[in-house]
Image (cartoon, helix red, strand yellow):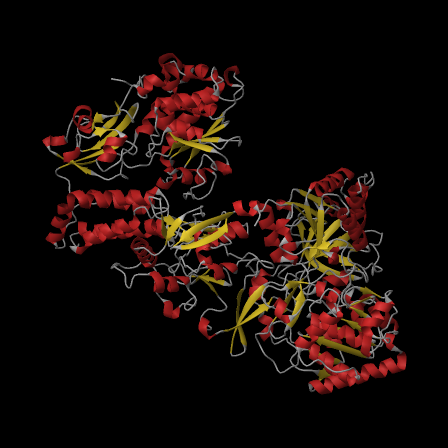
């Protein structure tokens, strides 16, 4: 131990046991290290010391009064006693007070069985009460929001929930109102408490005051089977516990992993799993609309693909996957197409991205330990909510500074030291300007014309980057246009070359396993592990001599070729191009021309309706395997529910077997092991190694590939930016979802200047036209983007928003009319 | 008789700055202060032995020297949330001589290099806020506030801020929370306000009376102040005498004056020829004492030795017609009503004690409830988050200690009838 560490450590004695802990640790936490339990209610390690419940009173030598162990920082040589008569009397006294007006309705309380108040009373409390008056009554079970029920009689006013709302969410939505014994947890004016992260208060409530409305009275906690799983929504891959009973999803709770979620999940994770019991699930395989057995379906798919390849060559078939699949599923699919069918027509996205980074791939924890975070084209609040909480923590409690470079206002702006708004669609020019500024030159006088951001502002931005010791760049490749991703990586390379600055980045595309899909080589020009087609020797060494080496078609190209009739068969996996790809209606028309369209998905979609053969995908809750989050951390998603349908990778392996591909893996572990063997960067990813906290995969090779789309067309009209929304009324959150109250109306956000020019005002119903299609929306004159741009949040599948976007574009021009 | 705070306080129109300047050499202490270095002013206050008059009696100069070094801006928050039952001295000072407070605040701010001062006034002081604001405006107009005060290069801005009528906001950290616009709840200490106070910056929180004593120290020297009072309790104290006396009111006395003199000489003695039964020496938060201790000198140490505290200097006198249970019930009601609810023992204990005392007062009490009350007191005392919990214990525990027979008498009557008293 070096001297610096020594001075940072403090040694104290608790009940005669010696313990050494870092300076600043509170006694409650120090005691845990030597297995001494000091009971608490209000203390929560993520919320910090507060000291209101008085449950943790201990005696400390040389202190005249008893001290609260949750607020008392350790001191060198401190002697703490937690088991004296005085402490015992204090604990009994405090518990008697705590229970004085508590209804003791444990037999009908959802918290029963997992309740700290129950546990502490059992361990430390008095056997009975001396209270002989009527307890203070309040309304039982009233809604705090459509998804949270509050029972204020049970509340012990520990203020965990209100502090969570203040310290973690930074909303102060939940507050204490009134005084003394009449105080109550509430929102101002009793508005619903419906933030993006409201559900966490249920988990941290130490009593049964805050309960999950959906779970209320549906199971006792001890009757639940709990699966340690991961969230399958955004790309943070938060850890959560899936509680089931009799093979039905009952509830979802947090499963803290400081390296990923910091102990929280968003409300979409908590209440966004209604799809596990939705009637819109694809329950059975179908062939031409008729239910068939899974083996029959797989045989049919294999035979049809084989026939088409034999007749038209391997490049007449293609695969469009998505980041919603597990690594094992995606790996199996690319292998099927490359090795079984001999084609590189493999892709999973409609935007440009390249594998690997010219700098370190930072993990989520690096956000807190950096000096500066640079957020580019990303809206974490809507896209990656847990990153939103982590950024707020970093800025407000860890002294991290933040630069926001986006084309639309986000909630992150108010936490940023510098917030620059570039014109929608001008990200390429902006990033080129930033790169110039990073090289110490002026971005030029016309940069402001092109992007809305001046050379001076970019210089200020570059200066901040240069003067920071550690910089974490977070960017959303899906929100960049044209070939900007290359410019962005040039910026990273330039920043990476700065002396005295450590630079890392996090590609933050919002889809669950977006990073995994890139790593698994679900790309037309890169093999798994970032192996570019040019590295033919390496590819042959790993995949054999038959491995196809010619560049395949991108997802958008496959649609084009389907339209022209050159592509004959397409397998679409966990993707809904008809609704989600640019110019979706045209995509639908193209798909109709295929000889064979196989859709392998979890929910019924517009694309599945067009399919000749439909295969069921089990999806989160049912499936098991690994995902790689935005921080490059590979974690294990286990299943909590079972189904008769085989796992996705298994279905792929059944198809492969018919095609004559070598031995099928016996279980998912075998696929994970094969990934470790075949995919660069994943060598250490073994089930045993990732079980608890996951494990970072080694960075994959950085490969530059050709962009899939061009920049924005020149022409008239405003430039449309489609913005992601966390609670989008899509296939996953259907109308019956618990989160239906979070759905928003279709709105179009305009700059004041454009609104004046168009003669529209706040609240007007307008028609937005583009690409021969029209979408109705209500006007918000919000200045969310610069003049010339327009932002429409993608609030539902019904909205048909992607129809407005021209094929091959990320942003597109639209006109607006009343 | 030495008068420092109440000197010429009944001069007509003393609230006007011209009268103040003429009658009391108003604002002349600033010249003396600006001739010295700020640290020298702190040393003077230290040497004077002035102690905080809000209740805790902490040495004022020492408090001023605890400000976190080299952290700016710093703030001064004058605690004018005078809410302690029995206490009405700050109101007199503000109402009759607002400029004395402003002068004291300027001196404190200069000594502590503070450029912003707030006067946090209890919600019920709304009419004096107007008066205070007017006085502040006058001080600005005369150049005693604002930029470069009297050419010294020292700047100070001053504001009044009204509370919303919560007793807890007299606790310094709750006061700061309230001043920041948050719910008035006490904060965790440490950090103490001198290190992290208002808006997380070093802050001095001083009582009105404390600040009003500072101009005298500057004008007459710390020795003059220290010459008054006892060895450890220096200077004069405003005592609000209330209860069963003939002439209730505020009296300024040198610390160390016998308590009985305050009752007999100053306040005209017990009403109606009755006898003294009990007295609360320092406001409702401190333990009451029986008549036998009435000769205790009125200073911090002597009262502490007698088993109570000088507190905010509110002497509440009870004659022998009083049933102490009724008085205790009233105070218990006050603390139940004023508990902020943050910590469990205070929130729950104050209400439980009130419930039991109500029963006893209604002649429904049980003998074992007296010991129960005592045990509740024990479970609360020194176990609450802030001193309000201990304050709530004071009257109950001391009334049982000295006047248990009053409880037993009521409990023995054991038949439902007219309550002995009402709140």
Q: Is residue A279 left or right of residue B307?
A: right
Q: Does residue B83 show up?
A: yes
Residue positioned 12% across, 55% down in the render: B415
Query: Which residue is more in the foreground, A315 or A3?
Result: A3
Is A684 above or below relative to A311? above
Which residue ends up furthest to the top in the rendered image?
B22
For the N terminus of chain B, the image quarter is top left
- Residue B395 in percent (x, y) is at 24, 42
**Would you identify the image quadrant in which residue B257 lies?**
top left
Q: Is residue A459 left or right of residue A159?
A: right
Q: Is residue A742 left or right of residue B89?
A: right
Q: Does residue A289 show up?
A: no
- Residue B67 in percent (x, y) is at 47, 31
Query: Which residue is more in the foreground, A348 or B43?
Result: B43
Query: Which residue is more in the foreground, A561 or A469?
Result: A469
**Would you identify the image quadrant in which residue A778 lies?**
bottom right
- Residue B151 in percent (x, y) is at 53, 15
For the C terminus of chain B, the image quarter is top left
- Residue A298 in percent (x, y) is at 74, 83
């Amino acid at each position: 131990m070096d001297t610096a560490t020594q001075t940072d450590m403090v040694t104290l004695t608790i009940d005669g046991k010696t313990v050494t802990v870092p300076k600043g640790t509170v006694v409650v936490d120090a005691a845990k290290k030597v297995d001494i339990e000091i009971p608490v209610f209000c203390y929560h390690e993520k919320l910090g010391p507060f000291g209101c419940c008085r449950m943790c009173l201990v005696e400390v030598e040389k202190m005249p009064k008893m001290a609260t162990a949750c607020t008392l920082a350790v001191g060198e040589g401190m002697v703490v006693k937690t088991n004296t008569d005085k402490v015992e009397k204090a604990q009994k006294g405090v518990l008697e007070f705590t229970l004085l007006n508590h209804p003791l309705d444990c037999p009908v309380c959802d918290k029963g069985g997992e309740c700290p108040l129950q546990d502490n009373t059992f361990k430390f409390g008095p056997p009975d009460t001396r209270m002989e008056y009527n307890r203070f009554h309040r309304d039982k079970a009233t809604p705090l929001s459509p998804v949270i029920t509050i029972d204020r009689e049970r509340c012990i006013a520990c203020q965990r929930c209100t502090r969570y709302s203040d310290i973690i969410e930074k909303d102060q939505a939940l507050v204490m109102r009134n005084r003394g014994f009449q105080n109550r947890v509430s929102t101002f004016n009793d508005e619903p408490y419906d933030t993006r992260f409201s559900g966490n208060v249920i988990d941290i409530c130490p009593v049964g005051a805050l309960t999950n409305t959906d779970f209320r009275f549906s199971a006792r906690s001890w009757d639940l089977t709990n699966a340690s799983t991961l969230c399958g929504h955004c790309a943070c891959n938060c850890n959560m516990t899936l509680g089931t009973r009799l093979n039905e999803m009952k509830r979802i709770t947090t499963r803290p992993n400081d390296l990923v979620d910091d102990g929280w999940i968003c409300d979409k994770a908590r209440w966004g799993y209604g799809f596990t019991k939705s009637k819109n699930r694809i329950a059975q395989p179908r062939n031409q609309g008729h239910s068939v057995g899974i083996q029959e379906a797989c045989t049919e798919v294999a035979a049809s693909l084989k026939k088409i390849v034999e007749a038209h060559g391997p490049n007449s078939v293609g695969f469009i996957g998505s980041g919603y699949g597990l690594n094992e599923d995606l790996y199996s699919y690319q292998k099927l197409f490359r090795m079984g069918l001999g084609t590189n027509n493999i892709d999973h996205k409609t935007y440009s991205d390249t594998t690997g980074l010219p700098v370190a791939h930072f993990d989520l924890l690096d956000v807190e330990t950096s000096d500066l975070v640079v957020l580019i084209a990303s809206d974490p609040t809507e896209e990656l909510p847990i990153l939103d909480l982590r950024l707020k923590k970093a800025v407000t409690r860890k002294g991290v500074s933040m630069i926001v470079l986006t084309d639309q206002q986000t909630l992150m702006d108010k936490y940023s030291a510098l917030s620059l708004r570039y014109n929608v669609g001008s990200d390429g020019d902006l990033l080129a300007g930033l790169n110039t500024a990073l090289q110490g030159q002026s971005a030029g006088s016309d940069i402001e014309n092109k992007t809305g951001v001046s050379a001076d502002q970019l210089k200020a931005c570059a200066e901040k980057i240069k003067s920071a010791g550690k910089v974490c760049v977070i960017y959303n490749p899906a929100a960049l246009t044209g070939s900007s991703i290359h410019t962005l990586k040039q910026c990273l390379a330039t920043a990476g070359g700065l002396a005295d600055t450590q630079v890392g980045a996090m590609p933050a595309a919002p889809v669950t396993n977006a990073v995994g899909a890139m790593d698994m080589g679900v790309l037309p020009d890169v093999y798994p592990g970032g192996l570019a087609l040019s590295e033919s020797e390496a590819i042959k060494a790993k995949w054999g001599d038959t491995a196809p080496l010619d560049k395949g078609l991108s997802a958008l190209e496959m649609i084009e070729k389907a339209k022209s009739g050159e592509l004959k068969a397409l397998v679409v996996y966990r993707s809904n191009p008809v609704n989600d790809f640019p110019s979706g209606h045209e995509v639908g028309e193209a798909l109709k021309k295929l000889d064979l369209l196989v859709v392998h998905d979890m929910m019924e979609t517009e694309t599945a309706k067009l399919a000749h053969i439909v295969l069921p995908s089990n999806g989160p809750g049912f499936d098991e395997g690994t995902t790689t989050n935005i921080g490059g951390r590979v974690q294990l998603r286990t299943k909590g529910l079972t189904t008769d349908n085989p796992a996705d990778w298994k279905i792929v392996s059944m198809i492969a077997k018919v095609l004559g591909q070598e031995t099928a893996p016996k279980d998912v572990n075998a696929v994970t092991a094969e990934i470790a063997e075949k995919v660069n960067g994943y060598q250490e990813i073994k089930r045993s190694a990732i079980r608890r906290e996951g494990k970072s995969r080694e960075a994959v090779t950085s490969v530059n590939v050709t962009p899939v789309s061009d920049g924005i067309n020149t022409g008239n009209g405003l430039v449309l930016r489609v913005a992601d929304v966390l609670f989008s009324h899509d296939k996953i959150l259907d109308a019956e979802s618990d989160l239906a109250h979070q759905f928003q109306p279709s709105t179009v956000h305009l700059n004041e200047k454009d609104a004046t020019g168009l003669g529209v005002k706040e609240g007007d119903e307008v028609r937005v036209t583009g690409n021969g299609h029209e979408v109705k929306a209500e006007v918000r004159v919000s200045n969310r983007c610069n003049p010339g741009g327009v932002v429409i949040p993608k609030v539902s599948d019904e909205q048909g928003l992607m129809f407005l976007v021209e094929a091959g574009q990320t942003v597109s021009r639209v006109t607006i009319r009343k | 008789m030495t008068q420092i705070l109440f000197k010429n306080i009944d001069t007509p129109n003393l609230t006007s700055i011209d009268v103040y300047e003429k009658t009391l050499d108003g604002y002349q202490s600033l010249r003396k202060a600006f001739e010295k270095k700020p640290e020298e002013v702190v040393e003077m206050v230290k040497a004077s032995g002035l102690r905080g008059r809000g209740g805790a009696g902490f040495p004022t100069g020492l408090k001023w020297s605890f400000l976190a070094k080299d952290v700016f801006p710093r703030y001064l928050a004058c605690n004018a949330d005078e809410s302690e039952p029995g206490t009405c001295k700050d109101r007199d000072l503000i109402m009759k001589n607002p400029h004395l407070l402003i002068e004291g605040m300027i001196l404190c701010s200069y000594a502590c290099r503070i450029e912003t001062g707030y006067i946090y006034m209890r919600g019920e002081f709304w009419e004096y806020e107007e008066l205070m604001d007017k006085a502040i405006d006058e001080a600005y107009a005369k150049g005693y506030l604002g930029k470069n005060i009297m050419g010294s290069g020292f700047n100070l801005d001053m504001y009044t801020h009204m509370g919303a009528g919560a007793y807890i906001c007299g606790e310094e950290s709750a006061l700061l929370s309230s001043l920041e616009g948050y719910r008035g709840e006490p904060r965790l200490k440490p950090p103490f306000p001198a290190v992290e106070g208002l808006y997380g910056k070093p802050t001095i929180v001083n009582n009105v009376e404390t600040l009003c004593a500072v101009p005298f120290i500057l004008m007459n020297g710390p020795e003059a102040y220290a010459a008054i009072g006892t060895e450890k309790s220096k200077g004069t104290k405003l005592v609000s005498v209330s209860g069963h006396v003939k002439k209730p009111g505020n009296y300024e006395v040198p610390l160390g004056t016998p308590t009985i003199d305050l009752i007999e000489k100053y306040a005209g003695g017990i009403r109606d020829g009755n006898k003294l039964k009990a007295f609360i020496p320092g406001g409702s938060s401190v333990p009451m004492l029986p008549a036998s201790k009435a000769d205790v000198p009125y200073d911090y140490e002597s009262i502490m030795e007698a088993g109570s505290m000088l507190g905010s200097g509110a002497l509440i006198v009870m004659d022998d017609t009083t049933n102490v249970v009724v008085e205790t019930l009233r105070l218990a009601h006050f603390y139940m009503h004023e508990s902020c609810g943050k910590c469990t023992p205070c929130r729950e204990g104050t209400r439980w004690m009130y419930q039991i005392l109500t029963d006893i007062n209604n002649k429904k009490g049980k003998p074992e409830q007296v010991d129960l009350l005592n045990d509740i007191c024990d479970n609360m005392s020194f176990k609450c988050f802030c001193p309000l919990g201990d304050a709530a214990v004071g009257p109950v525990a001391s009334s049982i200690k000295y006047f248990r027979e009053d409880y037993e008498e009521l409990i023995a009557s054991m038949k439902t009838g007219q309550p002995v008293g009402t709140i």
